[in-house]
Image (cartoon, helix red, strand yellow):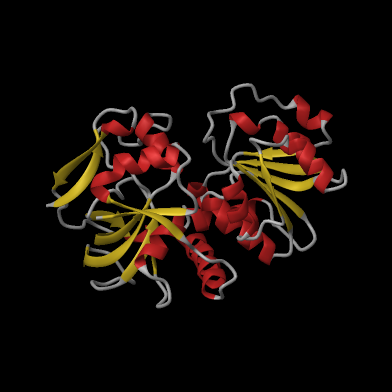
Amino acid sequence: MTIAVRVRETGGPEVLKVEEMEVGEPGEGEVRLRQEAIGLNYIDTYFRSGLYPAPAGLPFVPGNEGAGTVVAVGPGVAGFQPGDRVAYVGPLGAYAGERLIAAASLVKLPAGIDFKQAAAMMLKGLTAQYLLRQTFKVENGQTVLFHAAAGGVGLIACQWAKYLGATVIGTVGSQEKAALARAHGCDHAIDYRQEDFVARVRELTDGRLCDVVYDSVGKDTYPGSLDCLKPRGMWVSFGQSSGPITDFNLAPLAQKGSLYACRPTIFTYISDPGNLQAMADDLFHVVGSGAVKIEINQEFPLKDAAEAHRALQGRRTTGASVLIP
């Protein structure tokens, strides 16, 4: 038996219920994992609320990210054995002390990466990797706008984009978050509560605008994000923390300069184990080199998952947060 947080009906943070759960033995291609730390991510709130339906229906254990020690391996598992330190982005089920997970979702942790750090960076760090290195390949001399620059993905992505030689502009919701963003790679941080971010981007770039806008905010930053792009620039919509965009149409892309728009998700990029490993290697390299620092600014006991969700949705968190079983 293990402690787990289960959702039996979708809704607010109050639907997160702490229960005991039978884990069982690993099946074909699976490992049993004792979790040392679990990542807290905004996507967790989408599954909890029902905005994203859980693939297997109700009830379910939320969470897509964690790190821990392999306890047992099932038939057909190669490359992993009990005692291995691993981390993952994978199917739902992370909010638990122990879990079963497909070995194909795991990567081994280098010696210099601890469990909390790994749990805090797998989903967010691999998201930054596919955004900056695959969806739109950021290069030296380009200008990048990153919304929610003081959030978990934002702090990693802004450091990484700066390391790649870009000029990085970030939007944030307070002066405190602006200072945090500037300390993590942002050349310019715009407090959208105090300034019109479109006008400020135009001013900062002398009207040249941005090569790419990375937007996880959604409703509140659309269509303003499109107005921050130079002709043939790319708008990358990868989340909707302020609510979904309901009125998107293609015509403004032509009117605003033959713009590109895409809606990627990490799960497409990591579905191939070879690409997952290559992405993780890239992430571990920039973190290990010190170019990107992973800072855990909040820790919550797993049993307090509901309070963690309230803090996350109330914008009372910065950087990465982890749950500890």
Q: Is residue 52 above or below residue 170?
A: above
The C terminus sits in image quarter: bottom left
Q: Residue at x 49, y 53 (%)?
A: 319
Which percent across, then down, holds residue 189?
Answer: 68, 49
Which percent across, then down, holds residue 281?
Answer: 51, 69
Can the viewer see residue 59? yes
Q: Residue at x 51, y 57 (%)?
A: 126
Going by the picture, which residue comes out furthest to the top?
247
Q: Does residue 196 appear to the left or right of 103 in the view shown?
A: right
Q: Residue at x 73, y 43 (%)?
A: 234
Which percent across, then down, holds residue 196?
Answer: 73, 34
Q: Is residue 257 above or below residue 81?
A: above
Q: Does residue 235 appear to the left or right of 299 in the view shown?
A: right
Q: Does residue 138 appear to the left or right of 316 in the view shown?
A: right
Work out whether residue 233 or residue 198 is closer to the camera in this orientation and state it.
198
Work out whether residue 84 or residue 184 is closer to the camera in this orientation and state it.
184
Quadrant in which residue 199 is drawn = top right
Work out whether residue 158 or residue 31 is closer to the camera in this orientation and state it.
158
Q: Residue at x 33, y 27 (%)?
A: 11
Q: Is residue 191 above or below residue 78?
A: above
